[in-house]
Amino acid sequence: MQHSLLDLQTLLVRLWEEELPIRSVHLDHNFFELGGTSIGAMRVVARLKGDFGYRISPMAVYENGTPRLMAEHLLQISAQ
């Protein structure tokens, strides 16, 4: 399923909020700077794969640590 950039950003903000101890995540909040862990990143990756069909590695969460960057990354890989 192809999502728009806005849809992905909204989805990722929600995932960050579910995984992190903060409830008002913004597009430029970094997952790890807000207290995310490697285990949490693996849970995000699993949710993206299981619920939405996006296949990424946990390293992608490190490299694209904000909802804005991750949404752009997901659009790039889905276009390939």
Image (tube, helix red, strand yellow):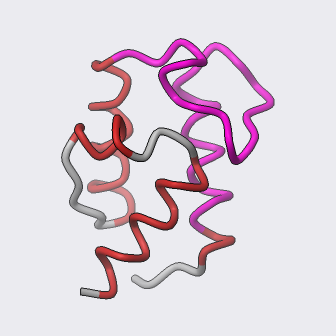
Quadrant assignment, res 22: top right
Indicate left or right for 6 with 76 as reference: right
Residue at 48 percent of width and 21 percent of height? 32
Residue toward you, 53 or 63: 63
The outermost residue toward the front is 63
Q: Does residue 14 appear left or right of residue 48 in this picture?
A: right
Q: Residue at x 57, y 31 (%)?
A: 30
Q: Position of residue 28 (x, y in %)?
A: 68, 42
Q: Is residue 75 above or below residue 71?
A: below
Q: Is residue 65 above or below residue 23?
A: below
Q: What secondary structure is the magenta-colored segment mainly?
A: loop
Q: Residue at x 64, y 13 (%)?
A: 21
Q: Is residue 75 left or right of residue 10?
A: left
Residue 43 location (% of width, % of height): 33, 32
Is 11 situated above or below 62? Answer: below
Position of the C terminus, as image quadrant, is bottom left
